[in-house]
Image (cartoon, rainbow, N blue to C red):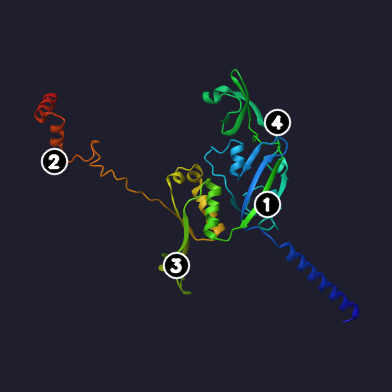
């Protein structure tokens, strides 16, 4: 090998080392796939209209604290689209304790305002109680809001109410979330707006698994199965009445459960519903709406009501004739 070739190889090795150092530097800080707990408040850049917040004081100042939502730090997974991409980009490479602000342009936030999505429709298509400017309505399967209404015609804007608005986020990274139960609880809260009681445990479960056929087995033979005990890591959660009636849960429990399985790395999600006794005794026979009145109690009940049982029988026999 000539000296020139040796020098070239050394230069290539130096370049490779430099690239490795750069990669290591780029990998520092929070990365896609990390769970983080953040505080943030977002306003429109020009109109100062509140878009979203985790701060209860801001919510109170803006008069939105009575909407049944709990305002507190939110747990998200970077790279999963849980927040605008521009905010994610600012968080990647940062460290817990960092804070900052980022402006999301309209086209990356709620889209540009499209004049073609503003249409005039018959007011008859709108519920009478919703025929006023600003009302959120659904017309022909599209969600929009009424900008004006005159007589029998309504001008409905099917753009997002914040379309055309740049959005400014101020954020603080509180911590990286490593505890898997906390991760799961944070995801459920993000999806449902509520944090259920949950825990993770490993169960031994019996499963039917296919048996590997012999090499000389008939290809058309029915597959054989055997019972095998396997371990399954499970997220258990208690289904409260609030959760059971949650629209997001009712419409998308399968998708939400799959997201939890994929992002937490468990095998399954089991939802448990507990029915507590109410201390009101039995419900009787359920037939006549008089719970608790067995056959032997009817005469006593009639006596308490000062009703003659023989007279009732005579009246019934007379009605049959």
- Residue assigned mark 1: 88
Position of the N terminus by quadrant: bottom right
Residue at 90 percent of width and 80 percent of height: 3
Q: Is disc 2 surrounded by few (<14), some (14 to 19) or many (20+) residues within 10 Å?
A: few
Q: Circle 1 sits in a helix, a strand or a loop, which is it? A: helix
- Residue assigned mark 3: 230
Q: Nearer the viewer, mark 3 or mark 1?
A: 1
Q: Nearer the viewer, residue 159 or 52?
A: 52
The vertical placement of 301 against 40, above or below, is above
Q: Which mark is residue 115?
A: 4
Give the mark nearer the N terminus: 2 vs 1.
1
Give the mark nearer the N terminus: 3 vs 1.
1
Give the mark nearer the N terminus: 2 vs 3.
3
- Residue assigned mark 2: 296
x and y percentages locating residue 237 in the rendered image: 45, 54
For the residues marked 4 and 1, what is the alpha-carbon distance in whole angstroms?
Answer: 30 Å
For the residues marked 4 and 2, what is the alpha-carbon distance in whole angstroms?
Answer: 76 Å
Q: Is disc 1 surrounded by few (<14), some (14 to 19) or many (20+) residues within 10 Å?
A: many
């Amino acid at each position: 090998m000539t000296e020139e070739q040796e020098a070239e190889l050394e230069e290539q090795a130096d370049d490779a080392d430099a690239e490795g150092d750069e990669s290591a530097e780029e990998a520092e800080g929070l990365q896609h796939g990390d769970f983080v707990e953040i505080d943030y408040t977002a306003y429109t850049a020009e109109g100062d209209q509140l878009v979203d917040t985790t701060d209860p004081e801001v919510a109170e100042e803006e008069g939105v604290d009575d909407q049944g939502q709990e305002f507190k730090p939110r747990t998200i997974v970077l790279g999963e689209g849980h927040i605008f991409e521009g905010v994610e980009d600012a968080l990647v490479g940062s460290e817990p304790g960092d804070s900052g602000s980022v402006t999301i342009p309209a086209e990356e936030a709620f889209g540009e305002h499209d004049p073609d999505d503003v249409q005039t429709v018959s007011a008859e298509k709108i519920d009478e109680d919703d025929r006023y400017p600003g009302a959120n309505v659904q017309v022909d399967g599209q969600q929009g809001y009424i900008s004006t209404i005159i007589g029998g015609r309504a001008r409905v804007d099917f753009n997002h109410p914040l379309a055309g608005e740049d959005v400014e986020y101020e954020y603080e990274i509180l911590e990286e979330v490593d505890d898997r139960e906390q991760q799961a609880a944070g995801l459920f809260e993000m999806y449902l707006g509520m944090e259920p009681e949950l825990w993770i445990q490993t169960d031994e479960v019996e499963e039917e698994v296919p048996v590997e056929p012999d090499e000389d087995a008939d290809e058309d033979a029915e597959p054989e199965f055997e019972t095998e005990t396997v371990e399954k890591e499970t997220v258990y959660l208690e289904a409260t009445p609030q959760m059971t009636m949650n629209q997001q849960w009712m419409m998308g429990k399968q998708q939400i459960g799959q997201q939890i399985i994929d992002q937490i790395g468990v095998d399954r999600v089991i939802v448990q519903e507990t029915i507590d006794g109410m201390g009101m005794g039995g419900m009787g026979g359920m037939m006549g709406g008089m719970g608790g009145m067995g056959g032997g109690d009817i005469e006593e009940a009639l006596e308490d009501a000062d009703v003659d049982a023989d007279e009732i029988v005579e009246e019934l026999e007379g009605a049959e004739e």
